[in-house]
Image (cartoon, rainbow, N blue to C red):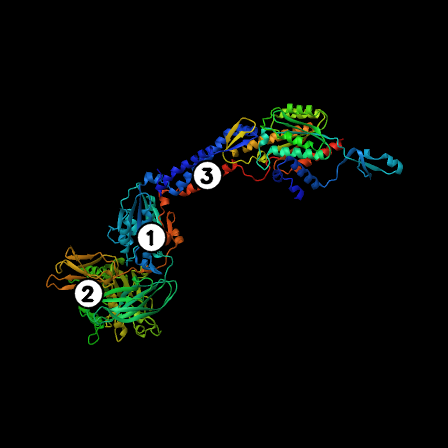
Amino acid sequence: MPDSKRFLHPETIARISRLEVRARHIVEGFLSGIHRSPFFGQSIEFRQHREYAPGDDLRHIDWKVWAKQDRYYIKQFEEDTNLRSALLVDVSGSMQYGSGPLNKFDYAATLAVSIAYLLLRQQDAVGCLAFDEAVRNRVPLHTKRGHLNSIIQALAVSEPARKTDMLSILRGAVETYPRRGLMILVSDLFVERESLFAGLRLLRQMGHDVVVFHVLDDDELDFPFNGATRFEGLELPAHLNCNPRALREGYLDALSRFLHDVRHGCARQGVDYTLVRTSQPLDVALTAYLNHRLAVQSRN
Amino acid sequence: MLPFVHAPLLWGLALLGVPILIHLINRLRHRRVNWAAMEFLLASQKKSRNWILFKQLLLLLLRVMAVAAIVLMLAQPHNQWAALLSHAKTHHIVLVDDSYSMSDRTSDSSALDRAKEVVLRLADQAARADNPQVFTLLRFSEAGAGDRNAQPDMLQEPLTGGSRERITSIVASWKPTQLASGPYEALEAIERLPHQSGSEERVVYLISDFRANQWDDPAEIREALARLEQQGAHLELVDCVETAHANLGIADLRITSGIRAAGVPLWMTVTVTNFASAPARDVSVTLAEDGLARPAVVIEQIPAGKSVTRRFPVVFAAAGQHRVSAQLESDAIAADNVRYAVVEVADTSPVLVIDGDPKASDATFLSTALSPGGKVKSGVSPLIESPRFLRDHALDGYDAVFLLNFERLDVAEIEALEAYVRAGGGVGIFLGELNQADFLNKHLYRDGAGLFPLPLVGVTELLVDRTEEVPDVEVTDHPIFSVFAGERNSFIGSILVEHYFAAAKNWTPASDAETQVIARLRNGAPLAVEHRMGEGRVVAFLTKAGPGETPQGSWNNWGRNNPSFVVAMLELEAYLAASRHATVSSLVGAPLATTMPLAQYQPQVRFVLPADQGGGTLTVDAEAAGTDQTATLTDTHAAGIYEAQWTLRAGGEIVPRQFALNVDPREGNLQRLDSAGLAQRLPGIKYLYSQAQDVAYDGERLSGPNLGRFFMWLLIGVLLAEQILAYSASYHPVRRGAVH
């Protein structure tokens, strides 16, 4: 494991208490790990010429240079910084579950802030919306570095409630961020599936690119419980005394169906879907995000 | 209820509640988990609630069964329903071979010692059984005691706490007998035991050394075993011997020839049998006369499985009964290494010579040959009489009767002679000029029913070419002529026969060996013929005894200056007398009977027992029968010389009569049968064969199988099922990420 990646593990992250420091730590470690030069894309600020190579986009050929020298050169610009990204972070009661160093909420918040830090570092505009049963906090889009603190404060929600209607929440997001941009939803998605898919459809209809980080704990995915256990709902008011060994198979079946539905529902809406375990290093999610950025840029 | 080996362990069934208790405690001791994905958990619970309940109950049941199986496995129940219903008790009938072959020793213990160990082991193991056990102990010697009431050492005695000591003391008193008892009498004896059919399980143990000679003709034993099997008895044959040892035994000791008179040499023979599979060399037989040692007989070699007979002379100075014993060096079996004989000699051997010729020239001639007088003592005391003497006097007192040259005998005389022969007497006949072939054929031969051996034609002259150097007489190896055997004897060869009685044409001796020609003339005609009748024997010479002149001239020259005549006549007399003194060899265990006139002897008879029988004396009351009285000693379990002491009513003088009892030499044959040999001889009989060290009371076979093993397998099965069920109902983290 490269040294840089060592710092991206949840065990390491959990030792850093401040979200801002966490984000910087993660992003710097992440970027040094991938050794990539700044991104090239469409921008106003010219950077350099480069000789054409087969496969380059013909739109980027500098025809003036060709007219003068009869040779193909590609014009390269500093990356465009006008990306607008909104972080939609689930802070409901179900996100409080965690078996590892970070519970789902911690993980989601760390991921969101890390993305915000990354975006702000590139002078992109970032906003944030925290929700449970309704939108609890909104942070408008900004490109200032100091904006990160606002986002961090917005994520601090006391007495999280049960989330119910995802459609209304996403509708609220659309209202908050009306201009087309990137919507990053970080949640465990324990909601009505129809309302979730309706909300995602609305986002897409409004022209947003949507990325879903589906955050789940290892326990929720593996259900490793043994012995008599009383399960009490974090959101639902139900409880269940059972031998979890006997219920495991049925539970995993139901969970598989749920994940399958979500994955296919997202795919149908053109939504990028990534399932992240809270035990996974943060770079997995960041890589997924950056891949999405590249894909969006190539589409543009 | 099933019978249990360890019934107190059944208290362990109280542990059946433990799995249920653990289950209930586990239901109370649950941990709390605040859970987000309740939706899926509730869906799972709704879907499989009934199946889960069923599996939980099944798991609980399996655990309860596992505890029950452990307890029952340790308690070891027996499936004894059938036994409980039909056989309340087990009757062990133990038949123990105590014949003298059981004294055969391997290392430190004899076969009988091993049989004793088997009996004690069986008793110990049977005592631990759950159902009542009854013991019957019977030795072969008791079963074959002759009288029909065998006396078992134990007869249907229940096994109790004190039985061990009782059986120990019983078997401690057992010693190998000198009998040759076989298993048949024992099997027959237990068939007569009262048998409560259906109420008892019978196990018959035949503990023996299974010597081959006792099983040569196993039909009787097989039938007895088959009958027991039909009665529902279980048969177990227990072999106490593993290998057959070499053994030598004295098979016979008897007088063969000679005149039984004091001071006259007698010939005895001793026969030694080698029962081993290898030849025996330089076998020394120690002899004793009246307790005094005499030169031993050494046999250079006895081939394997063969017998060798050696002759030796004995001379008894005084008249009366004399003891002779022969003894071998010690080997595997001691009982057959010694053999006893009692030889009775008189002062003289009285012989009656009947001559039909009033001049009695032949009688005189024969008497002179039998008793020459002077310093030479032949031991024979001849008395010359006319045929009338036969009618008027008892012949019992004579060792032999000679009939010479008689014209005729009346019916009474013939009957007296024939009665004498049938009772064991010997008659020698020499014909002569007075004899008539018709009379002999009609009254003495009587188509083979009379005492004369053959039908005759008449007097014939031996017409031969005298220039040929061929002896007139050819003798066989008959005892009378055995002294002349071996090489051509000039004395026999010099006999000339002029006249003789020719046998009927086409007469040949019957094939039953009752009649045989023991000497022939050179023309093949019979000269001397022996005929056996009843216990006695008749030897007829078809020529004259004396060489005297007759109207036909001299019949032969045998008696004239030919020493072989004297020798042959003495041998003839001894041969004829021998049948009256036949060595009757009584076997150990057979009743010993002695008879004396009622008028002369007191009815109380004192028997002096041999040392092996414990020594001492035993007084028996004689039973009167007519003018005689007979005393019978039944307790004759040891070989040796027994002496019956009769007391004269007048004067109180004691008259001793001695008897020799010997072991049955066949029992010394230690060749044995293995399991295959037994199986071959007992086809169709269901039995269990085992070596002494392996035998054990298989209570399981009788009282139903021990179910402990069944419960062990049940436990394994239940535990396996429980593990599989528990595995299927539990979480086993094989790899991370069961769901991606």
Q: Residues within 10 Å of mark 1 (few under 14, many from 20)?
A: many
Q: Amino acid at mark 2?
A: Tyr
Q: Tell whether A281 sits left or right of B376.
A: right
Q: Tell whether B34 sits left or right of B559.
A: right
Q: Chain of mark 1?
A: B
Residue B272: x and y in percent read: 32, 65
Q: Secondary structure at mark 3?
A: helix
Write down the residue under mark 2.
B398
Residue B118, disc = 1
Residue B423: x and y in percent read: 22, 60
Cα separation, mark 3 vs mark 1, equals 41 Å
Residue A103: x and y in percent read: 59, 34
Q: Tell whether A248 sits left or right of B576.
A: right
Disc on the earlier residue, 3 or 1: 1
Q: Is residue B493 above or below residue B46?
A: below
Q: Tell whether B352 sits left or right of B330.
A: left
Write down the residue under mark 3.
B718
Nearest to the observer: residue B61 or residue B537:
B61
Q: Amino acid at mark 1?
A: Val
